[in-house]
Structure formats: C-alpha cells, structure tokens
Image (tube, rainbow, N blue to C red):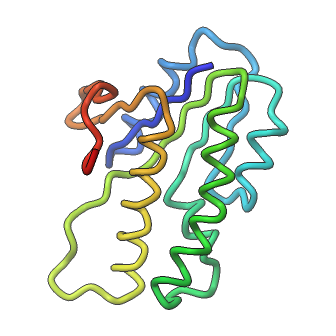
Amino acid sequence: MTSTLVLGNAPGDLSRHADTLLRPHHGVTRVGGSTDDLTRALMAARGPVLVEDIPGWLAGQLGNRVPLEPAAAQRQVDAQLDELVVALQALPFDVVVLSRETVPAVAHPEPAQTLLRDLLERVNRRLSAACRRVHLVAAGRVLDISGAPLVGH
C-alpha cells in the first residue's frame, strides 16, 4: 500500500497527476470533500482510493460553526484527523489524497479565513507525515518532496 499526498493550487493539475498515479488500477473509489466521515469512506473502499478535496472535508468538519474558538476547532479537527491518519496507514491498497497548499494571508483576513488557513496547514502537515509519498504540483510540474525533512524534526 502506498499513500500519496498531492499538494498544489491548480485543481486540474492535481487531478491529472492523481490520475497518473492511479492509472494502473481499476475500480478506483473517488471520495469528495463533501464526505462527512472520510475515515469511514476509506475503510469501506475495496480498492484504490482518490480523496479529491481535503479543504472541502475540513470545511465540512467545521460545518456552520465557523468561526469557532480556535482551540476548540483544532480539537474537533484533530479527533477526525487522528482517525484519518490511522486509516491511511492501515489500508492495504493505494490512496492518493489531494489538498490545496495554503497561500499567504491577505492584508486583513476575516477570523474564519485565518482559522481555516491555519487548520489546513495543520491538516497538510499531519497528512504529509502520515503519507509515504508527498508530491508538490506547481507550474505544471511535479516535485517529489517525500525525502525532505519535516519541519521541527
């Protein structure tokens, strides 16, 4: 089993690269960001999985409660993320996870925007540490950063 996190900001390029990674497989299960229980969707799959929208999943975890108090939002997301990481590492087939790389903050962001950006950074870091491979897609190119050191380690 290989889990691959694909990060970038061009959705079309992310999807094309994911399709390339999963091309040798038949019966790929596609899981969208609107899936409320991503861990359950992964565990129910019977073959390779493409998780198409981590930022959408994150927004769904917060629901109508944005803006939450940041510490409470972090705890809520961490609980779901802990389960997701275990599932990613336990699945016996390939999983490709697509996420957006966070962008610098605008001059005066709304508190909800800041919270979502900070939580997405946290989610991407955790998924990066959990996945065997990490690819960065930028300017139509793929950079394999799997061997790069983790920040703070």
| Quarter of the rendering occupied by the C terminus | top left
Query: Residue at coordinates 31% horizontally, 59% vertically from top-left?
Result: 102
Residue drawn at the location 68% of the way across and 52% of the way down: 83
Residue at the spot x=71%, y=56% of the render? Answer: 35
- Residue 134 at x, y = what percent? 38, 32
Regarding residue 127, the answer to whether it shows in the image is yes
- Find residue 115 and report its horizontal and vertical position in percent: 40, 79
User: To which quarter of the image does residue 105 belong?
Assistant: bottom left
Q: Residue furthest front?
A: 153
Residue lying farthest to the left in this orientation: 107
Q: Examine the rendering and report whether any part of residue 142 can be seen.
A: no
Query: Residue 1 location, x and y as percent?
Result: 63, 19
Q: Is residue 93 left or right of residue 132?
A: right
**Residue sitting at the far top:** 24
Please give the count of numbered marks on the rendered protein.
0
Is residue 63 found left or right of 136 in the rendered image? right
